[in-house]
Amino acid sequence: MDNRLLMTIGYQGLKPEDFLGKLKENNVSLLVDVRQNPISRKPGFSKTRLETLLQENDIDYVHLQRLGTPRELRQDLKDNQDFEAFLEKYQAYLGTQEESLQRLKNLVEELNCCLMCFEKDYQECHRQAISSTIEEMFNDNIEVRHII
C-alpha cells in the first residue's frame, strides 16, 4: 500500500486568503472541519463562507461534527487549563466515534485531506488526537503533516 498523507491546520492568526494559500501549497483537495460548531468570530471561517471560498478554489469541504470537542470538555479545559487531562478525556470520547473515524479514514485513502480547527499549535489541539488515531488505523503506514 502506498504511504498515505493526512495534513492538519489551525486557522488561528491567519486571514482567509493566507489560509487558502497554505491549503493550495500543500495540494489539499478536501478540508475536513473537525470543530463541533463550525462557526467563528473570525470573518471567513464560519462554515458557509469557508465552504464557498474553498469551492471557488476547487477544494472540497466536509464537516465531521462528531470529531469536534464536546462542549463539556471544552468548558473543563477552559476552567482547569489542564491540556493533558483534556486530551485524555477527548481520547476516551474519540473511542466512541468509530463511524466518524472510519469515514475519515476512507476519505484519507482517496483524497489529500487536511483536518482543520482553530488552534495554531496542533500540540494544543484535539486534531493531534484525531491524527494519532488515524495513524493507528493505518498501522502507521501514513504520514501526518501539521501545516500549522
Image: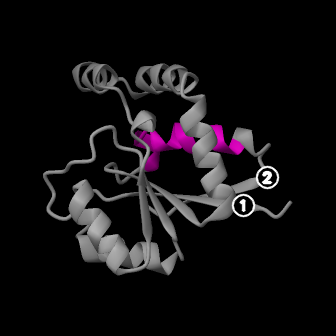
Spatial CA span between label 1 and label 2: 7 Å
The residue at the point 53 percent across, 27 percent down is 94
Residue 45: % across, % down? 23, 59
Crowding near pointer 2: few (<14 within 10 Å), some, many (20+)? Answer: some
Numbered tag placed on residue 4 in the rendering: 1
| Residue 105 appears in the figure | yes
Tags 1 and 2 touching, CB below 8 Å: yes
Q: Nearer the viewer, residue 30 or 43?
A: 30
In the image, what residue occupies the spot 51% across and 71% down? Answer: 28
Quadrant in the rendering for residue 103: top right
> In front here: 124 or 60?
60
Residue 30 in the image: above or below residue 119: below
For the record, the magenta segment spans 122-135
Give residue 130's mark.
Answer: none
* Residue drawn at x 63%, y 56% as measured from the top left: 108
Q: Is residue 125 magenta?
A: yes
Q: Residues within 10 Å of mark 1 (few under 14, many from 20)?
A: some
Q: Reply above or below: 37 against 10.
A: above
The residue to which callout 2 is attached is 141
Dot 1 amino acid type: Arg
